Image: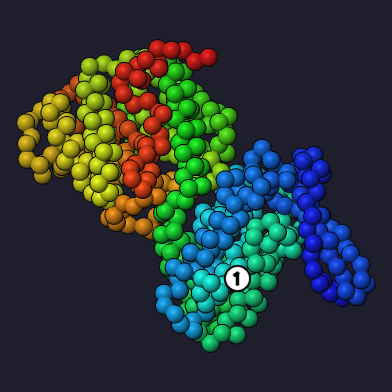
Amino acid sequence: MILIQKHFFMLNKYSGYNSKFYLKIGTRFVYQINTKKFLKTTINCGQPTYETHPHLLCKNEVIPGIKKEEFLSRQRSLMRSVVTRKSDVYHILVIPSAVRKYMSDHIPYPFRQNSDFLYLSGCQETDCALVLFGDSDSNFSSTLFLKPPDPQAELWNGPSSRADDASFIFGVTNGKILPQLSSFLTNKIQNHKKCVLWYNQKQKVQSFVDKTVNSVALENKIYINDSLDNHCHKLRLYKSSSEQKLMRKSCQIASKAFIKAMKSTKPGSTEHELYATIDYECRMGGAEFLAYPPVVASGINANTLHYIDNKQKISNGELILVDAGCEYHGYSSDISRTWPANGKFTDTQKTLYEATLSVQKDLIEMCHARSSLDALYDAMCYKLGKALSEAHVFKKNVQDPKDLAMLSRTLCPHHVSHYLGMDVHDTGTVKKNIEIESGFIFTVEPGVYINQNNNFVHDEFLGLGIRIEDDILVTDNSIEVLSANCPKEVEDIERIMSISNN
Ligand SMILES: [Mn+2]
């Protein structure tokens, strides 16, 4: 048996820079006490690092833009959040990674990590788990459980990180392999009188971890606290300055893609081509992929809220509603714009568009007051009804605020805002009635969708669908519209569309 006294890590700059894959980011020397010799092994990493991808990451960053220290501070904050009072209770928190999903035999979907796991570890590998354990935020450790080495799998999928290198790569206290999770949890539980096991039961992101946690809990008669996601989402709600930078960039990339799409729009082209333009421009801008299947809806298709078919031909005189965003190093943008196929709004389209835009701008102004997302929605219902009434969209003269709000709710059946971050509908367990604070990022997205059977509006508006959506960051003293570079004024859109793409 080899007794390992100490690991020495040495980054191999040259092999790293020359490496085309994630291999060989450095060398580990292991001192063996019994033989008094150094054993030399290679440090593998299953994701880009500064050593292999210096065009993506800076020194000490685990994922682009986020340093090791920030992951440690996130873990500490989560411990602080779950330890409610000073006591002798020992806490064990289990956060699973996502698994690889397949579209057909051996053909994987692009992998996307579980956001809570990525937020806390920075690890982009499949089939692993992070465990935090201790009795306070000043006395806790972290263990990353990684896949056991599998040369056959690595032949096909490339190298994956080794448990021995977990602390070096991710900054966790130590690493183990996933099959050790069960005995590890059992051991911790049996060595502490009062234990709480924290694990999100609502979303089964990985069946192995799910089965392990539940069977260990059952065997040891220990209670599973299911609210870990609430604690994690509350932390994720406040974007750090490095996260704000990534979000800003994500919105800038998407905004540029929208401008290109507007410029390339012409009657006779297809929704599919616009989709391709946005996808291409986002990737060329540095985004990994689009943050969600985009809505590219021409004409009456805009009345289908989640229209993602995107196959129709674009006709002269129609409006096109596009709702798209990209994911940039794990952070999402979410923008909607509506523009005329031929580059010029008709009077009717302009009337409805200007009414929607005025409401959207009012709501963005309202963000300075830091009410809540629900307050923005209530305000939208009244303001939209009023704006549409003043623009003579309705057949009848509606004045009563309640009637106006009710009409708005039928014309805009969705909420006006959601939190935005690593997920498009970010921090889903956080209520929308809480006061907006510095560091929050959310959307403001009023829409008007008039289907062809609507009896309340004048016929000329039937079939039109409009949504205008921006992404807002609340700063200490003000707000920042992260998607401000994406044109939304009628004259800006018409001017941009008169200049051809090159
Ligand atoms: Mn949205």
Q: Is residue 365 left or right of residue 123?
A: left
Instruction: Determine whether 256 is above or below 54 in the image.
Output: above
Residue under the image location 30 percent in, 21 percent down: 490
In the displayed image of the protein, which residue is found farthest to the bottom? 193
Q: How crowded is mark 1: few (under 14 residues within 10 Å), some or many (20 or more)?
A: some
Name the spot of residue 264 as percent of width and height, x first. 46, 18
Which sits in the foreground, 107 or 357? 357
The answer to whether residue 130 shows anywhere in this view is yes
Residue under the image location 76 percent in, 53 percent down: 44
Instruction: Determine whether 98 is above or below 403 in the image.
Output: below
Q: In which quarter of the image is residue 338?
A: top left
Q: How many labels does the image show?
A: 1
Residue under the image location 27 percent in, 49 percent down: 370
Q: Which amino acid is tagged 1?
A: Ser
Q: Name the residue under label 1.
A: 141
Name the spot of residue 203 as percent of width and height, x first. 47, 61
Local SS, label 1: strand
Name the spot of residue 500 as percent of width and height, x first. 46, 12
The answer to whether residue 307 shows anywhere in this view is no
Q: Quadrant of residue 258?
A: top left
| The N terminus: image quadrant | bottom right
